[in-house]
Image (spheres, helix red, strand yellow):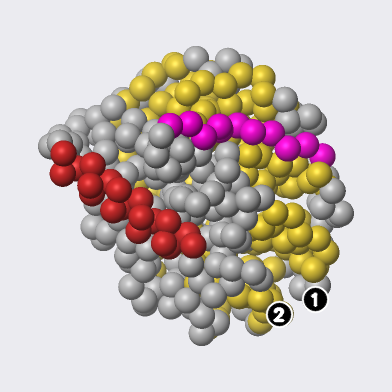
Amino acid sequence: MKKLVSLFVALLLLAACSDSKKEEQPAELVDIKSSLKVSREWSYGFDGDAVRLRLALRANEANGVVYAAGFDGEVVALKANNGRRIWRAKTELELTAGPGIGEGLVVVGANNGVVVALDAATGEERWRHQVSSEVLAEPLISNGLVVVRTVDGRVVALTAEKAETRWTIEQAVPKLSLRGAAAPVVAGDAVIAAFDNGRVMSVDLQTGDTQWDTAVGTPSGRSELDRLVDIDAPVRVVGDDIFVVGFHGRVAMLARDSGQIWWARDFSSYRGLAVDGSLLYATSAEGAVVAMHRNDGSVSWEQAALRLRALTAPVVDGQAIVVGDYEGYLHWLSAVDGAFLARAKTDGERITNPPLAIAGHVLVQTDSGKLIAFKTVPKS
């Protein structure tokens, strides 16, 4: 509940600010010369109106099967190549996060704090467990544990077999924060978790013992709105390096073993980043897509033509970067220089969560619950 109140307060503050000056409008889309041919392959629709709730529902894939969930409580397994349904389960919950997949389980979280584990092969329910508050981050499944991040600043590890609590860690939640939570990420024998107070923690996966705790964002400014330093996007782990980005904060590279910050630069994002080769890609709070060099954070290129279009985090699709926007458009940008390669429209509803790139396809789930698969091929 605190998260929802926080969102309303933030919106009221923003509305008050807009009274004193002319509000800048989102950039209008202009025609582009496409070098990729985009075709819609298949789609699947969930019931339940989740528009503008900014839920953490995003399709996931393993071994040619796509797993997805809807706000109405439905969880499905679909063939990735054609969208044919393998199984469907009804949880009778208002789902808000997931599915997380792994070790034969499909795990989802609900707005009332209930976590449900289903059998990945059949959809049969294995267990359900009540955690402390709403789940707005994809559950993590690794080494016999299901790790769940809740909006009240807790991370809890449950046994994958019986949902018994193994450990819990907690960070303080600021008075005002964005609606969202960063999904925990596994790195070797550790879980890396990021929090609304701008901190990133590494804890032992089996025991929950803290290995390091680093402040990436430091609150500053006169108002509570200025002092937001939420990290609502999962960190990215590449070898011995961890990349993280936060709101009103910084994008930074940390050492995986110690949490030491190797480099950091001012950058504000509530969406997240992607990493590929020598570059990392991030969408700023203002709607710019920026490519930075992984070794020092210097900018390689920036695409600003999508300003204020509430972009998703970027995903890497071959030689392209894909982002979604508030009008339901997908944009393919060149990973080399940020030039537009293609554009496609979904169902016209906001895309909050990043697309999923798999085996030559890009899957996206809009906030209305529509799951759509696209395929791209170079134009001859």
Answer above or below: position of 360 versus 86: above
Circle 1/circle 2 CB separation < 8 Å: yes
Looking at the picture, tell me which residue is in the foreground, 172 or 341: 172
90 relative to 208 in the view: left or right? left
Q: Secondary structure at mark 1?
A: loop
207 relative to 346 in the view: left or right? right
Q: Position of residue 194 (x, y in %)?
A: 62, 44
- For disc 2, the neighbor class at 10 Å (few under 14, some 14 to 19, many from 20) is some
Which residue is found at the position 38% from the left and 48% from the top?
375
**Residue 162 within the segment the image draws in magenta:** no
Q: Position of residue 74 (x, y in %)?
A: 49, 77
Answer above or below: position of 192 versus 54: above
138 relative to 213 in the view: left or right? left
**Residue 212 within the segment the image draws in magenta:** yes
Mark nearer the N terminus (1 vs 2): 2
Residue type, label 1? Lys
Answer above or below: position of 265 versus 199: above
Which residue is found at the position 48% from the left and 67% from the top?
1
**Residue, far left:** 22
Q: Position of residue 87 (x, y in %)?
A: 55, 78
> Magenta residues, as a range?
211-221
Quadrant showing the C terminus: top left
Looking at the picture, tell me which residue is in the foreground, 373 or 24: 24
Q: Position of residue 313 (x, y in %)?
A: 44, 42
Instruction: Specify whether residue 79 is in view.
Output: no
According to the picture, the residue beneath numbered tag 1 turns out to be 162
Q: Quadrant of residue 333?
A: top left
According to the picture, the residue beneath numbered tag 2 turns out to be 127
